[in-house]
Amino acid sequence: MTFTKKPLIGIIMGSSSDSRIMKGAAEILDSFKIKHEDQIISAHRTPSRLAEYANYAEKNDFKVIIAGAGGAAHLPGMIASHTIIPVIGVPILVYNDKHPKNTETSKFSAFGGLDSLLSITEMPSGSPVVSVGVNKAGNAAIYAMKILSNEFPEIKKILKKHKSEQHQSVLKESELMKKQGLKKFTQKKFQ
């Protein structure tokens, strides 16, 4: 089995509005040519579909499920309760984007995503779900790759190269800041 031929990671989300955050996971996995399958599954509106998906993921030998949800954020915990596949939860700051746009009211969560974070991380003893930070779907993808790297040595190499590139990027920016000075560097970088 290879990680480039068949999906080993399932990316699920509770609503289509979560897709703008969850695409970050897909973009990372795509950039490393790691196959994934993406679906909308609501813990509250399609509970029987959630149970079916857990069976489907096991039958298709998924290695990791990345589950994004906002508000009460029950999706990661509920999918974890139906499978032994590791689940990485992505807490999402809920947006009111299914209604007319208004910059003042488009953010919907009264808790800034903390509600989702706590819902995902405060699972009962014996039913763990790993969580990344609010809206950090890209980090969930990197973590999923770390899990896969235990089985696929090629992914270990990819991750080591990625870490090295991050390291070099910071050194390059630091050298540029040192050369230009903080004020000039900031003006050019954040215009």
Image (cartoon, rainbow, N blue to C red):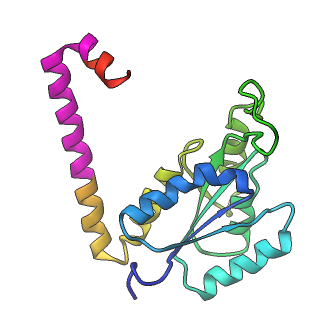
Spot occupied by residue 7 in the image (x, y as percentages of width and height): 50, 78
Does the magenta segment cover residue 118? no
Q: Is residue 9 visible?
A: yes
User: What residue sits 55% from the left and 84% below the top?
Assistant: 61
Spot occupied by residue 29 in the image (x, y as percentages of width and height): 43, 64
Q: Is residue 73 left or right of residue 159?
A: right
Is most of the magenta stretch helix, strand or loop? helix
Q: Is residue 123 visible?
A: no
Q: Is residue 121 left or right of residue 183?
A: right
Rendered image quadrant of residue 55: bottom right
User: What residue sits 18% from the left and 42% below the top?
Assistant: 168
Q: Quarter holding the N terminus?
A: bottom left
Q: Is residue 108 above or below residue 81?
A: above
Rendered image quadrant of residue 58: bottom right
User: What residue sits 78% from the left and 76% below the top?
Assistant: 51
Q: Quarter holding the C terminus?
A: top left
Q: Is residue 84 left or right of residue 43?
A: left
Rendered image quadrant of residue 177: top left
Q: Nearer the viewer, residue 113 or 182?
A: 182
Spot occupied by residue 9 in the image (x, y as percentages of width and height): 52, 72
Which range of residues does the magenta coloring cover? 163-184
Spot occupied by residue 24 in the image (x, y as percentages of width and height): 51, 53
User: What residue sits 87% from the left and 63% below the top?
Assistant: 45
Does the magenta segment cover residue 177? yes
Q: Nearer the viewer, residue 158 or 125?
A: 158
Q: Nearer the viewer, residue 185 or 87?
A: 185
